[in-house]
Amino acid sequence: MASRQSELSSSCSTLLKARWWSKETVAIVTGANKGIGFALVKRMAELGLTVVLTARDNARGMEAVESLKKLGLSIYYHQLDVSDTSSIKTFASWFANNFTGLDILVNNAAVSFNDIHENSVKHAETVISTNFYGPKRLMEELWPMFRCSSTVARILNVSSRLGLLSKLRNDKLRMILLDEKNLSETQIEEMVNLFLEDVKNGTWETKGWPELWTDYAVSKLALNAYTKVLARDYTGKGISVNCYCPGFTQTAMTGGKGKYTAECAAEIGVRLVLLPPEDLPTGMFYLGSNPPNLYSKI
């Protein structure tokens, strides 16, 4: 762990030397009252950005903000439940009334109802609604507010290697997702609907879906695919859209188990989202647990 921290400290020093942001740079982080989201907000605020912390639970969100204020950090806050369309619209309206533009969005909010070694799909609809449709609808609502300038606006979707195409055993669906040139939002939603139909019919275990944390994996599979579509459609238009898998991290979702702390995962996430404009790719999948090869094609 010592060498890991040394590496992160070195990367952060390099990042600061290439600083392109200022206090006028505005970032939103979803699901940020604890874990990786909280650590992301804290680190970006320490680096001098204007950060908006959001949380589904209002009391916990306000408590998180107060804890950061005690550290001398200035944080903005608004309640946001990404699984609720009306909550997304309310948040977007508040943001538009209080800020002149958006530079960075980190879609971190996500849920899973399984313990580490469980694989129930009892809550599949909620998982899909939160982990896929939530970020999708939020991006759609906030899209007009992005400042697409020479510094390049950024979206980082916190994802998982469980949603990589190699985990999908359905050859027909995998071929559709591999056709990046023609892949569409409609095809992605059709895949998600097919999964939910298989869950409803009790046939999901035999249809080639990912074997581990299946509903969570499908939600991230869809999010990864949607990231590819956005990156393709907006290449050269001043906005970068990427995914980031923090690896097996010690959070509430993993029951506190994992190889990495939330702070370690957030440090890499911040490094990625603050890459200099000239070094910032789009449509990539970052694997935070393997720093020598930080990104690859989704």
Image (tube, helix red, strand yellow):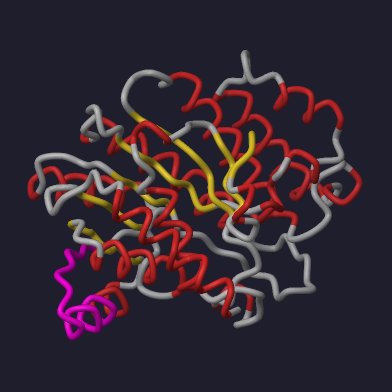
Determine the residue positioned at 37% across, 71% down.
38
Determine the residue positioned at 29% across, 74% down.
61
Q: Position of residue 117 (x, y in %)?
A: 79, 73
Image position of 100 (left or right of 204): left
Image position of 157 (left or right of 249): left
Query: Which residue is the extreme one toward the top?
Result: 182
Q: Quadrant of residue 29?
A: bottom left
Task: Name the foreground residue: 274 vs 66.
Answer: 274
Q: Quadrant of the C terminus?
A: top right
Q: Position of residue 9 (x, y in %)?
A: 43, 68
Determine the residue positioned at 62% across, 81% down.
255
Q: How many marks?
A: 0
State yes or no: residue 69 in magenta.
yes
Task: Name the foreground residue: 84 vs 29.
Answer: 29
Q: Quadrant of residue 34?
A: bottom left
Q: Quadrant of residue 96?
A: top left
Q: Position of residue 158 (x, y in %)?
A: 51, 53
- Bounds of the magenta span? 63-78
Q: Is residue 291 above or below residue 208?
A: below
Image position of 140 (left or right of 267): left
State yes or no: residue 56 in magenta.
no
Q: Is residue 143 above or below residue 244?
A: above
Determine the residue positioned at 34% across, 34% down.
277
Task: Name the foreground residue: 277 vs 76.
Answer: 277
Q: Position of residue 80 (x, y in %)?
A: 31, 59
Query: Which residue is the extreme one toward the right?
Result: 206
Q: Quadrant of the N terminus?
A: bottom right
